[in-house]
Amino acid sequence: MESPGGSRGSGRGSPASSAGGATPPTPPGPEVALAQLQEDATSSMTLAWNDLSVWVRRRKEGAGLLSRQKYEHKQILNSVSGVAKSGTLMAIMGASGAGKTTLLATVSQRVKGIMRGEILVNGHVVDQQFMCKVSGFVPQQDLAVECLTVREHLEFMARLKMDQRVRASQRHRRILSLLMDLGLSKCCHTQLRRLSGGERRRVSLAVQLLTDPPFLFCDEPTTGLDSYSAGAVVEHLRLFAARGKAVICTIHQPASGIFDLFHQVLLVAGGRVAFFGDVADASRHFDNLGLVCPSTFNQAEFLVSQLAIIPGREGECLKKVQWLCDEFDNSKYGQALSDQLAAHTGRFLRSESHEADSDRADGLGHSLSRVGRSWSVASCDSYENSEEFQKYLNIKKPRRFTQFYWLVWRSLIEIRRQPTDILIRLGMLMFIAVLISTPYVSITRDQKGIQNMQGFLYLIVTEIIFAYSYSVFHTFPHEMPVLLREIGNGLYTPGPYYASKMLILLPRAIVEPFLYTLVVFLVGGLTGGITDFLLLLVPVWACAIAATAYGCLMSASFESIETAAMVSVPYEFISVTFSGLYIQLGNLPAHLAWVPFVSLFYYGNEAVSILQWEKIDSIACDEDPGIPCISSGQGALEKYGYHADDLGLDIAGLAGIYVFCHLFGFIALWRRSKRQAVY
């Protein structure tokens, strides 16, 4: 058997590691960075996982509405082992709920959870960061920005996945090569949402192959495809395996012809290994156990049927599964797997101890996470000084500004591809502007007109705040699955993503309010000329921009639009109440005097009121001397508790709300980005 370290002499006995402080090889220059990633494997790379056990944390059933939630740990995988070598195409099969996807995501280190066991590459324990660099993961559920074309999607991914030192010409050649290899040349200018299922699978595959990783993981690559498309996808996977990659797939009841394309199969049942070995040996092993596949039966379907848990016969099926797993452990195939694992784990300095599987659930998370940390330290010592891994360790990710630039680029394309939505939104805003302005045409400057004017100004501000805050409530809930997937894959960080959303929202918050203000100014007959119109634009713009920040805070903080809208109601109710129209702000009790200063509506209403009333020196009094008379614009401001000198304070207050909301919106998004992506 080949040495797990390959021919380059890596491992604890290698000269690099024995030298202690030996300096790693010099990183490759830009002219060879891509060539190193695309070169055929000159030394075999082997991925091994030994004694993997995985637990998930879930709520206990029966917890009351007001009682404290209790959790338990459910074991999904139990001491699962396997080996995948370069040049092999492996199928992971089993009945539904057997743990296939969990195993694939655990071996590729795409999941966060409680895990015990060893994951090694060429005899070295590796961490999540390293596995993301040396492997690609094609999920069953493809998540992407649907309006991009195939070429645009690959260009975006290449810019953020590939070494930043790779030249544009090399990057374009890589994209063209993948388009040709995967038969995507004819649809390279087609939007993703218009592709067939097979084409979408091949696009996902192309994305993961951009960096030419030695390991490729595919979760149910044939699900939902017809037999021809499924066969074409597996043929491509076999071709890439022949080029020196180790390709591992979960697959559900493949057709006989498709199953024969795989080199190896790993059967999972009840979280354990029921068989591991060559595809042809699987039938021999089951034949030896007296489980013979009928000649007219699909071999893969027969194997899976022997591992299924049939409703109503759970006890009998569980005993059979236990027996099958025990028989494999004692078979020559189980011994062969043990021999391979011994060769790969023998060069690894094992962690000090493993906790027993019988640990109580309450202490499980602490004990296993402690063991996991000891592996992380060992892994740094194991692979960082290994020459064979340097071309992957030396990949330079794009700078944050580059991430920001391409995220903005993608968002602009998404906006440009939705002209109907833009026109409908603008048309509705203009319609509302006319609707709220029409009742106030030719407002008179008398005692009765004061209330009309103030009501009109209130509607101008309130509508713009509600329109722009609620219009962005959908932003993060809608994009969160894509965001979690891409951040989890190391494509970019939350900072550039959030900054790109801040920038993308600004043009709309400037152009649309300009047209909105123009309509209400002309139709409503507000005081002044072009200078006064431009001055009125300032607080309206400030309200729209601050409202988008408030909407981002709500959107980033909650799972759904409905929850965000429900939680925002109390704040908006209080803010509107203390905006000056319903309560005389000059007579507020001391313990409520601070409330207006956290209100978007207060700052906006006071600002537009100041701009309209401060130039009105005289207001005609009513003929009835018994009716109080407000004789000037200053008096009108005082009636509602506003101060003519506070215009600058109002703009500063809106700016402060903008900064506050975006700061805490980013914190909320950053915390949510730490969650596990869906695979």
Image: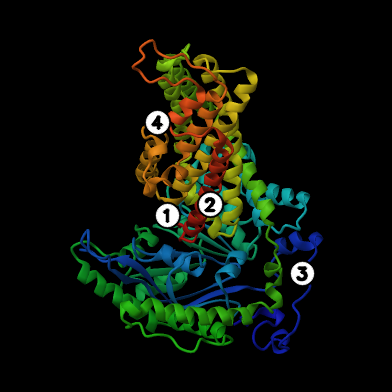
Mark before the other along the chain sequence, 2 or 3: 3
Determine whether 176 is above or below 650 in the image. Answer: below
Q: Are marks 2 and 1 in contact (CB under 8 Å)?
A: no
Residue at point 53% right, 59% down? 488
Q: Nearer the viewer, mark 2 or mark 1?
A: 2
Determine whether 576 is above or below 135 in the image. Answer: above
Residue 393: x and y, percent? 68, 69
Residue at point 55% right, 57% down? 487
Q: Nearer the viewer, mark 2 or mark 3?
A: 3
In three-dimensional space, the C-alpha distance between marks 1 and 3, rounded to whole angstroms, equals: 46 Å
* Circle 2: element type: helix
In three-dimensional space, the C-alpha distance between marks 1 and 4, rounded to whole angstroms, equals: 71 Å
Q: Which of the pair 666/343 is nearer the observer?
A: 666
Residue on which disc 1 sits: 255
Mark before the other along the chain sequence, 2 or 1: 2
Tell me, for residue 581, which label it has, or none.
4
Tell me, for residue 279, which label it has, or none.
none
The reply to whether residue 345 is in sight is: yes
Residue 551: x and y, percent? 47, 42
Residue at point 57% right, 37% down? 191
Residue type (three-letter) at the residue carrying disc 2? Val
In three-dimensional space, the C-alpha distance between marks 2 and 4, rounded to whole angstroms, equals: 65 Å
* Circle 1: element type: loop
The answer to whether 575 appears left or right of 514 in the picture is left
- Count neighbours of disc 2 (C-alpha within 10 A) and say few if under 14, some if 14 to 19, many if 20 or more: many
Residue 653: x and y, percent? 54, 43
Residue on which disc 3 sits: 27
Q: Are marks 2 and 3 in contact (CB under 8 Å)?
A: no
* Circle 3: element type: loop
Residue type (three-letter) at the residue carrying disc 1? Ala
Residue type (three-letter) at the residue carrying disc 4? Leu
Residue on which disc 2 sits: 233
